[in-house]
Image (cartoon, grey):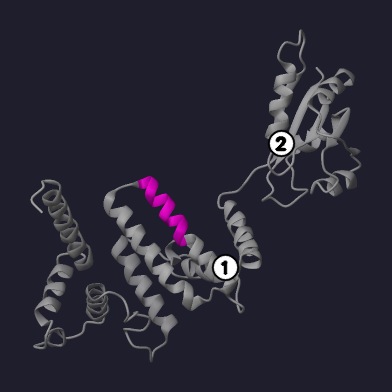
Amino acid sequence: MPGLIFLASSPRVAPGQLTWRAWDTTRSAGRVLTGSADHPQLPYLREAGIHVEVAEPDAAALVRETSSGTVVWLAGADGDEALMREVGAVLIGMEDPPEVEVVHGAYDLPGARMLDLVAVMETLRRECPWDREQTHASLAPYLLEEAYEVIDTIDSGDLEALREELGDVLMQVAFHAEVADDFTVDDVAAGIVDKLVRRHPHVFGDVTVADADEVNANWDKIKSVERGDDASIFHGVPMGQPALSLAAQLQRRAAKADAPDELFTDEDTGAELFALVRRLRAEGRDPEAELRAASRRFHGRVRRWEDSGSA
């Protein structure tokens, strides 16, 4: 039965990479139309011998054309939803309306919206005065702030807020990659993919592990090889991180290297706190998280005191 088919394809998929049904639909249609002479699918359809005409996006005219056979409309990047709504309005009240269908010619793969983020950051870096002025150094405080905001949403259990805050962190990664002259966001992604594959031989290789402890042990061995024999066990530890998390990370590294107990003792200022960090770590508790939780409880108690009118 003749009808109108909207052929939609993701702008994040390479043009010409259409589904079999999309190719079959365009080949068998009476007419194939599009509203743009620059539609990315045009060269590939024409190369395949499919005649495509550029026409005005007129809903009434499209519906009339179906009287002579099936009409395929190549939707633009936004899906031409406004045109589809106009077609729906035309169909209302028709005694024998034609069938209208949406055929998806190309679907997004997981992670495809990352391409949108990269494109937006490229545009901002080129056209926004503030974004053009930024450097790795000027952006550094924002990355730290966004990371702390992620921790806040995790502590609060607000998953919707977590999604948003993770997006802010992801934006910082894309921003730094856009600012860089010596590497691109693809280099960043390639580097972490290679590292993950290399450090998970039990998944991507032929290594067998019994449990998560063996996974961690293998990770540390591989990491040690990557650092080199002469590298310190503290290689890569950021000394500028908050003091509690710094103490915990240094202790973890030293413990994995079987450093003697006497190295963990100290009589200088902060020794008791350092010892407390060691005890919490031995109990499997995160000192930073423990103090943050206590601070949140204190925050709540003071707020309730304020709200009671006692302040």
Q: Residues within 10 Å of mark 1 (few under 14, many from 20)?
A: some
- Pick the residue in front: 164 or 41: 164
Compared with 24, 252 (above or below) is below
The structure residue drawn at horizontal position 35% and vertical position 79%, both measured from the top left corner, is: 238
Compared with 2, 127 (above or below) is below
Helix, strand or loop at label 1? It is: helix
Compared with 9, 301 (above or below) is below
* Quadrant occupied by the N terminus: top right
Secondary structure, magenta segment, majority class: helix
The structure residue drawn at horizontal position 74% and vertical position 43%, both measured from the top left corner, is: 18
Residue 212: assigned label? none
Relative to 6, is 299 on the left or the right? Answer: left
- Pick the residue in front: 258 or 67: 67
Q: Position of residue 124 (x, y in %)?
A: 61, 63
User: Can you tell which quarter of the image residue 104 is in?
Assistant: top right
Is 199 a magenta residue?
no
Q: Residues within 10 Å of mark 2 (few under 14, many from 20)?
A: some
Helix, strand or loop at label 2? It is: loop
The structure residue drawn at horizontal position 74% and vertical position 24%, both measured from the top left corner, is: 87
Magenta residues?
Answer: 159-169
Q: Are marks 1 and 2 in contact (CB under 8 Å)?
A: no
Residue placed under numbered mark 2 in the picture: 80
User: Can you tell which quarter of the image residue 220 is in?
Assistant: bottom left
Furthest-bottom residue in view? 230
Instruction: Kindly identify the amino acid type of the residue bearing the numbered disc 1.
Output: Asp
- Pick the residue in front: 247 or 209: 247
Disc 1 from disc 2: Cα separation? 31 Å
Residue placed under numbered mark 1 in the picture: 131
Instruction: Kindly identify the amino acid type of the residue bearing the numbered disc 2.
Output: Asp
* Quadrant occupied by the C terminus: bottom left
The structure residue drawn at horizontal position 56% and vertical position 49%, both measured from the top left corner, is: 110
Relative to 47, is 113 on the left or the right? Answer: left
